[in-house]
Amino acid sequence: MIPTLVLVGRPNVGKSTLFNRLTKTRDALVADLPGLTRDRHYGHGRMGNQPFLVVDTGGFEPTAKDGIVHEMARQAESAIAEADVLLFIVDGRAGLTPQDQAIADRLRKSGRPLHLVVNKAEGMVRAMVAAEFHEMGCGDPLVISAAHGDGVRELVELALEPWVNKVGADETAAAGDDSAAVAKVPKVAIAGRPNVGKSTLINTLLGEERVIAFDMPGTTRDAIEVPFEKNGKHYTLIDTAGLRRKGRVFETIEKFSVIKTLQAVEEANVVVLMVDASQDISDQDAHIAGFAIEAGRALVLAVNKWDAVDDYRRERVKVDIGRKLNFLGFARVHYVSALKGQGIAGILGSVDKAWAAAMKKMPTPQLTRVLGAAVQKQAPPRHGLSRPKLRYAHQGGSNPPIIVIHGNALDHVPASYTRYLEGCFMEAFKLQGTPLRIQYKSSR
Ligand code: GDP
Ligand code: GDP
């Protein structure tokens, strides 16, 4: 599972500044998509090959009894309970406060791995700052400046140490040909907010098809993976947010967990995003969709409960999707009834296509030809006296496909032109179903 770092601390200590810094490298890869709103509390980070999730709990006040602060504390509590690593942020300039002490007590009780992070320490003597916070009993404080970036890399390395080592060991053990097998069987996550019909869909899917191995041991913290087969094709279903097998069927037995949903999305190759046709598209739908795009996942949109809505409502839902999820233009849409088993085969067909698109091999000569044709048809706009020169392209990765464009003065290619190029590559290589990343490499 993807490790989750949860940032906790009283207001104004610099959590959101640190959050932005931790998630910046990933964000930079995501094109500036119109309509895409980011959830500022949940983000992706990456260190080397190791992805991680970052959760900012906002201003955590464990003693609040009611109102909005209490609600925030409640959400923070559930994030703390699910954290793989807690980063407890304090303000090195303000010094130690009683509120910090109260939070520290609360965090220690959680039993989760905990690092004390002293922020705003630029220009201060590390040893002295650390000494002051030692008495909190949270171990050696890590002294950083989120605003300047000092110590942030060391912080992430330390926090992720258990995973980074593990990844290295796994790779040596797997010795090559396992990765080919992994690449052939797509991991599919069925994601969506509570009650859209995820468990109904899974049961319909698995009820019809042969489930190959159903006894993966799983504690509540582990992902459950269910391999299954349909029409001779293999898939691995990843458990999402509180879906658990009970007897022969899946049930929603836990309360909805954003972190589990996002971990499953990150873990998956293809995400089936489910929305409910009887409800308007909500911010939560849009945030899950946005997160899937940031993770670069191939995506199929399933609009469920189509049996339960009339023509008026159907039109309205289509308009609503076009407006609020317009950044999902690359994804195929299916109008289905998980309950009645209508339209379900189409979803798997689109999963196959999206997966094939996500793994497409694009040879350099072809990419460069498509690039040339695109530039010929519409050149990038001038910037001052110079015009960006796009010379050739090669593939830099898969799932999502990354296209690296080489040339000169590429810093000034506008986002709108990048989107134009994306469209050209999408069409030429039939990439419908997956987001695409374009990176620029200027030579001097
Ligand atoms: P949050 O409420 O914990 O999310 O805190 P913010 O990230 O919003 O930061 C609160 C204030 O502290 C802002 O004015 C930040 O610019 C400032 N701040 C954050 N990190 C640093 C830092 O490393 N050094 C200094 N001097 N100020 C910082
Ligand atoms: P989950 O929380 O996303 O797993 O949602 P469930 O699968 O538990 O479904 C929530 C409710 O919606 C249940 O009462 C289902 O019977 C109902 N439901 C699910 N799919 C459909 C559908 O296609 N049509 C209708 N009318 N109801 C559905």
Image (cartoon, helix red, strand yellow):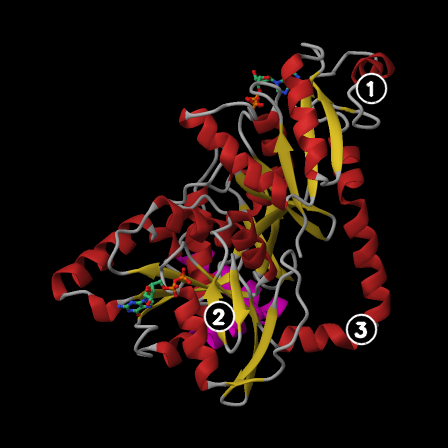
Nearest the eye: 20 or 418: 20
Residue that appears at 75% across and 75% down = 178
For the residue marked with disc 2, what is the amino acid? Answer: Phe
- Where residue 44 appears, as percent x and y from the top left, is 59, 45
Indicate yes or no whether the magenta region holds residue 371: yes
**Magenta segment:** 350-377
**Residue extending furthest toward the left:** 312
Residue that appears at 87% across and 16% down = 127
Tell me: residue 110, above or below residue 276.
above
Q: Quadrant of the N terminus?
A: bottom right
Q: First in sequence: mark 1 or mark 2? A: 1
For the residue marked with disc 1, what is the amino acid? Answer: His
For the residue marked with disc 3, what is the amino acid? Answer: Gly
Q: First in sequence: mark 2 or mark 3? A: 3
Label 2: which secondary element: strand
Q: Dot 2 surroundings within 10 Å: few (below 14), some, or many (20 or more)?
A: many
Is residue 379 visible in the rendered image? The answer is no
Locate residue 441 relative to residue 413 in the image: left or right: right
Locate residue 254 relative to residue 313 in the image: left or right: right
- Where residue 256 appears, as percent x and y from the top left, is 47, 52
Residue under label 2: 250
**Residue extending furthest toward the bottom:** 232
Query: Cβ of disc 2 within 8 Å of ligand 2?
Result: yes
Ligand 1 placement by image quarter: top right
Residue under label 3: 176
Locate residue 203 relative to residue 101 in the image: left or right: left
* Distance Cα–Cα, label 1 vs label 2: 47 Å
Q: Main secondary structure of the magenta part?
A: helix
Residue under label 1: 134
Q: Quadrant of the C terminus?
A: top right
